[in-house]
Image (cartoon, rainbow, N blue to C red):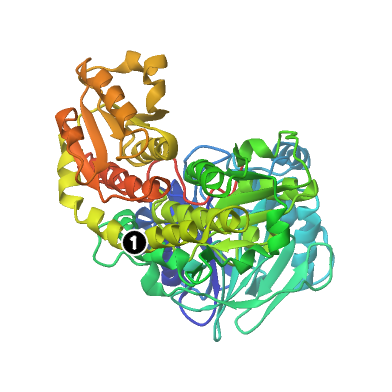
C-alpha cells in the first residue's frame, strides 16, 4: 500500500519526485524518503510523517541530480521511525531500493545474511531485499553493468517469497533505474528524454499520458531515452503502451477543501458515466459487452458469488439483493480475504464477480485467481481498465468513475451499485422480466443524477446535523433490506475518517442484543426511506426513543411520519426500493465528512489507513 515514484531524465529529479509523492500520499503517510544519484554517489533524505515533513527537510539541504527514487510508507514490518523509512540500502551503501509489498520469508533471509556478516539498520523486510540484491551484485565478476545488476535482481527475487513492487538505483550505474513487480502494481511512464516508474499512474500524469502497466514477474529497465521489459525467468516480456484516460486536472482538488468532498459532489456525473451508453430503451435492457458472455451463457447461470473487501463488500451485499430481486438468481457474498482460504462448494454453473475500485486489492485479486483455478468464470468490476484484475479477469465492467484519491471510498461505491443494477437488469430481461418492467428500471436509473444533485443541495443542513452530534463517542447505524448494507457502509465511513466507533446492524436486530447499548449519549442513524419495510423501521425508531436515544433518520421527501419520532430528518427524493442505496448513502458520506472536519481529522488521509490495499 506504499507509494513509489522513480525518475530519470534531464530535469532536477527532486521536485518531480516530491510532486509524485504528494499525489500518492493516499497510499501511505507514515514516513517518506528520496534517494538521488549525485556526482556518482547516493544522497538520501528521509523522515517520519507526511510528505510535508520530507519537503521541509529537503528545503534545508536539497539533493540535486537527474536520477532518483522515492517512497511514501504504510508500515508493515517495523515501527514508524526514520530508520525504517525507505529508501533502504545494501551492505555496500551503493544500492538504494524502495518497495511496496511484503517479503514473507524476510526473517529467514535476514538471519542468513547476518551469519554472512551483513549488518542492518532497520527492522524492515525491504532492507533485507536490498542486501540480498547487493550480495548477488557484489559476488558477480566483471565491470559494473546493467546486465550484472539485473542478473543480481533476478537471483534475489527467486529467493523471495511474497509480493513486491520495487524501484532500484546503484551509484556505480548512474544512468538507469530498474523496477520489478509481483503482486504490487508498478507502471512505467514514457516521456520525451525522460522516463518514470510509479505504483500509480496518478503520480506521473502531469508529465506523460503514455504508460505501460507491468505484469507480474516483469522487470523494467529505464534510461533517459529507452526502456526494456524482460521476465524474471529471462527473455523479453510482452507489453502494451496505453493512453492514460484522465489528466492532471482530474487528480486535483479544485475548489474543494478535501478530495473526499470533491468526490462526493462528483457522484451525479460518475453515476451518469457508469450507465452511459449501456442502456437500451428500445430493448428495455442493459448492454454490457465487456462481460464477454453470450445470452445463452448468461441464461445458463444458476448461482452468482460476489466478492470484495471493505466498501466493495458492502456494494456486493446490495448486489445480492439486486440480483435476487431483479434477476431471480440465487446470490451470495463472500469477503475476498475469506474466499481464497475457504473450500466453498460451487457448481459449474456458478458465475463469480470480484469488485475492487483500484483493481489491485491483494485479497480480491487472490480471490479472482482462486476462482479461476477452480474453473469458474470470474468477472471483474473495477475502476482501472489497466489494473491487474481488469487484465486477468475473464471479462467485466469498467466503472468510469475517474480517479478516487480520498482514502474513504465514496463515488466508487455508488458507481459499483449502478453497475450491479445494470447486470441485474440484463440478467432479469433475458430470463423473466417483461419489457415494461425493464423500461421502468431504465427510467429510474436515468433519474438518479438529478436526484443526487437534490441531495447535495442539503450539504449545509447535513453539516449542521453533524456538528450537533460531534461530542458522540459512538454511533449506531440501522437499516433493512436494501439499506442494511448502507447502514454498514455509513458506519464504516464514520469509523474511517472521524475515529468514532460505529456499527451497522439490520434494524430488526436491534431488540436482539444491541438495544442494550442505547443511551441518551448514543445517536442512532436510521436509514428509513418510504419502502416496503418503512412501518417496521418506524417501530424500531420508537424502541430507541423509548429509551431516550437520539435518532437521525434518512427518509423520503413528502413522508412526514419520521418527523414525529426522529430528532433530525434528512430527506432523499422518492425512488424505487432497489435504487434507494445510491441515494441514502450520500447523506451518510456527508455526515461522516462534516463530523470528521469538525473534530479536526484529516479526512483524506485517516490514520492507519491507505487507499489501495496491495498487501494481505
Report x, y in % for residue 328.
59, 45
Which residue appears at 76% of the width and 51% of the height? Answer: 372
56 or 518: which is nearer to us?
Answer: 518
Which residue appears at 25% of the width and 53% of the height? Answer: 455
Report x, y in % for residue 351.
69, 49
Q: Is residue 600 visible?
A: no
Identify the image quadrant of residue 120.
top right
- In this picture, residue 406 sits left or right of residue 5: left
Identify the image quadrant of residue 442.
bottom left
Label 1 SS: helix
Question: Mark 1 packing: few (<14 Cα in 10 Å), some, or many (20+)?
Answer: few
Q: Is residue 78 visible?
A: yes
Residue wearing tag 1: 447
323 or 478: which is nearer to us?
Answer: 323
- In this picture, residue 423 sits left or right of residue 202: right
508 or 491: which is nearer to us?
Answer: 508
Quadrant where the C terminus is found in the figure? top right
Which residue appears at 16% of the width and 30% of the height? Answer: 567
Report x, y in % for residue 74.
50, 46
156 or 64: which is nearer to us?
Answer: 156
Amino acid at each position: 500500500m506504499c507509494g513509489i515514484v522513480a525518475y530519470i531524465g534531464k530535469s532536477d529529479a527532486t521536485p518531480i519526485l516530491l510532486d509524485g509523492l504528494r499525489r500518492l500520499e493516499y497510499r501511505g503517510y507514515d514516513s517518506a524518503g528520496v534517494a538521488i544519484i549525485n556526482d556518482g554517489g547516493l544522497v538520501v533524505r528521509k523522515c517520519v510523517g507526511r510528505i510535508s515533513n520530507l519537503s521541509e527537510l529537503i528545503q534545508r539541504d536539497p539533493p540535486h541530480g537527474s536520477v532518483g527514487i522515492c517512497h511514501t510508507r504504510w508500515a508493515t514490518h517495523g515501527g514508524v521511525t526514520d530508520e525504517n523509512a525507505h529508501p533502504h540500502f545494501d551492505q555496500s551503501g551503493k544500492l538504494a531500493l524502495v518497495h511496496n509489498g511484503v517479503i514473507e520469508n524476510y526473517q529467514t533471509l535476514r538471519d542468513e545474511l547476518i551469519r554472512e556478516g551483513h549488518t542492518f539498520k532497520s527492522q524492515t523486510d525491504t532492507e533485507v531485499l536490498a542486501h540480498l540484491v547487493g550480495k548477488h551484485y557484489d559476488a558477480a565478476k566483471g565491470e559494473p553493468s546493467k546486465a550484472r545488476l539485473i542478473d543480481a535482481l533476478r537471483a534475489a527475487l527467486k529467493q523471495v517469497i511474497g509480493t513486491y513492487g520495487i524501484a532500484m538505483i546503484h551509484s556505480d550505474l548512474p544512468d538507469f533505474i530498474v523496477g520489478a513487480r509481483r503482486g504490487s502494481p508498478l507502471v512505467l511512464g514514457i516521456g520525451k528524454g525522460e522516463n518514470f516508474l510509479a505504483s500509480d499512474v496518478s503520480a506521473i500524469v502531469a508529465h506523460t499520458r503514455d504508460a505501460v502497466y507491468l505484469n507480474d514477474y516483469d522487470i523494467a529497465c529505464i534510461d533517459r531515452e529507452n526502456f526494456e521489459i524482460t521476465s524474471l525467468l529471462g527473455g523479453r516480456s510482452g507489453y502494451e503502451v496505453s493512453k492514460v484516460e484522465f489528466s492532471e486536472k482530474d487528480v486535483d482538488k479544485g475548489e474543494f477543501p478535501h478530495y473526499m468532498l470533491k468526490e462526493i459532489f462528483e457522484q451525479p456525473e460518475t453515476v451518469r458515466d457508469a450507465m452511459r451508453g449501456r442502456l437500451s430503451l428500445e430493448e428495455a435492457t442493459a448492454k454490457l459487452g465487456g462481460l464477454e458472455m453470450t445470452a445463452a451463457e448468461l441464461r445458463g447461470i444458476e448461482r452468482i458469488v460476489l466478492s470484495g473487501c471493505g466498501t466493495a463488500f458492502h456494494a456486493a451485499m446490495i448486489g445480492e439483493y439486486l440480483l435476487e430481486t431483479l434477476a431471480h438468481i440465487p446470490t451470495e457474498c463472500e469477503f475476498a480475504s475469506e474466499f481464497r482460504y475457504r473450500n466453498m462448494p460451487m457448481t459449474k454453473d456458478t458465475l463469480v464477480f470480484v469488485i475492487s475500485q483500484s483493481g489491485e486489492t491483494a485479497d480480491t485479486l487472490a480471490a479472482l485467481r482462486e476462482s479461476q483455478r477452480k474453473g469458474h468464470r470470474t468477472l471483474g468490476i473495477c475502476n482501472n481498465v489497466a489494473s491487474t484484475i481488469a487484465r486477468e479477469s475473464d471479462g467485466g465492467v469498467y466503472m468510469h468513475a475517474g480517479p478516487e484519491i480520498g482514502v474513504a471510498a465514496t463515488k466508487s461505491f455508488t458507481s459499483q451499485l449502478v453497475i450491479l443494477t445494470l447486470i441485474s437488469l440484463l440478467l432479469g430481461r433475458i430470463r423473466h422480466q417483461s419489457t415494461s418492467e425493464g423500461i421502468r428500471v431504465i427510467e429510474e436509473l436515468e433519474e438518479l443524477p438529478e436526484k443526487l444533485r437534490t441531495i447535495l443541495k442539503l450539504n449545509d443542513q447535513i453539516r449542521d446535523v453533524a456538528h450537533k452530534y460531534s461530542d458522540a463517542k459512538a454511533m449506531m447505524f440501522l437499516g433493512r433490506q436494501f439499506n442494511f448494507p448502507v447502514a454498514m457502509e455509513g458506519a464504516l465511513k464514520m469509523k474511517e475518517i472521524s475515529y468514532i466507533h460505529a456499527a451497522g446492524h439490520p434494524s430488526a436486530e436491534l431488540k436482539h442484543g444491541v438495544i442494550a447499548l442505547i443511551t441518551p449519549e448514543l445517536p442512532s442513524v436510521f436509514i428509513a426511506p418510504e419502502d416496503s419495510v418503512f412501518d417496521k423501521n418506524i417501530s424500531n425508531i420508537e424502541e430507541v426513543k423509548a429509551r431516550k436515544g437520539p435518532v437521525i433518520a434518512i427518509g423520503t421527501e413528502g413522508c412526514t411520519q419520521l418527523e414525529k419520532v426522529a430528532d433530525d430528518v434528512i430527506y432523499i427524493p422518492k425512488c424505487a426500493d432497489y435504487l434507494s442505496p445510491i441515494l441514502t448513502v450520500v447523506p451518510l458520506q456527508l455526515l461522516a465528512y462534516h463530523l470528521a472536519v469538525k473534530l479536526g481529522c484529516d479526512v483524506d488521509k485517516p490514520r492507519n489507513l491507505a487507499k489501495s490495499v496491495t498487501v494481505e
